[in-house]
Image: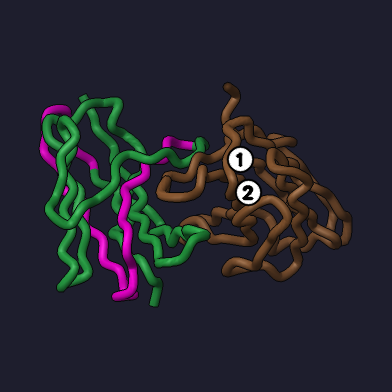
Chain colours: A green, B brown
Amino acid sequence: RKEVEQDPGPFNVPEGATVAFNCTYSNSASQSFFWYRQDCRKEPKLLMSVYSSGNEDGRFTAQLNRASQYISLLIRDSKLSDSATYLCVVSHSGGYNKLIFGAGTRLAVHP
Amino acid sequence: NAGVTQTPKFQVLKTGQSMTLQCAQDMNHNSMYWYRQDPGMGLRLIYYSASEGTTDKGEVPNGYNVSRLNKREFSLRLESAAPSQTSVYFCASRAGGGQETQYFGPGTRLLVL
């Protein structure tokens, strides 16, 4: 079983739609949580960190449920430019900050 | 600032050939990482360097070696390439301390025939 699991998609949505991605992680010792975005044939880039109380950054909202070991990302009012793969990432304790990546969920926003 | 740079961008090797992937960062970061990305697998950590002068194995180190040449540079060497090493390789760096964000280079696409 993969340590971080995501629905691979693709999610095909029209502009303006709201879309939600889910992610589960298996290691209860995971301490930090992130969503990274990866455009086609490009490097991953940090989209946002995920905090226990939930956090929002413009049209993006991230939630964490430690009891269920579940992370979510909600995108409101989707734009064409949101088309990308969204990577769920967790890290364990330790000074070297090892990140564990999910395989990603692909989003395609169409006109 | 260029951020994290990687060379080469593309490479084709024959089985058994060797090569070194280069990575450099100009952000004065302490930690550096090498990942590989395969379809459906997500990024997997090959080796990392928590600070200058140290290196440690990640999840998939077999067939690779690394050198942290100085604070800026972290190279990945394939001594005898195998088709299973066909992948996209990403280098990343992190400031260290309380800073958790990793910054990635543009990647090297490697094909081993």
Does the magenta segment cover residue A34? yes
Seen in the image, is A32 located left or right of residue A22? right
Q: Is residue A26 above or below residue B43?
A: below
Q: Residue furthest right?
A: B17
The secondary structure type at the circle numbered 2 is: strand
Mark 2: which amino acid? Tyr
Seen in the image, is A98 located left or right of residue A37? right
Mark 1: which amino acid? Gly
Chain holding disc 1: B
- Along the viewing direction, whichever of A9 and B63 lies nearer the viewer: B63
Q: Quadrant of the N terminus of chain A?
A: bottom left
Range of residues picked out in magenta: A12-40
Q: What residue is disc 1 on?
A: B107
Chain holding disc 2: B
Q: What residue is disc 2 on?
A: B89
> Which class describes the residues within 10 Å of circle 2: few (<14), some (14-19), or many (20+)?
many
- Along the viewing direction, whichever of B12 and A63 lies nearer the viewer: A63
Q: Is residue A14 visible?
A: no
Q: Residue at left 39%, top 61%?
A: A91
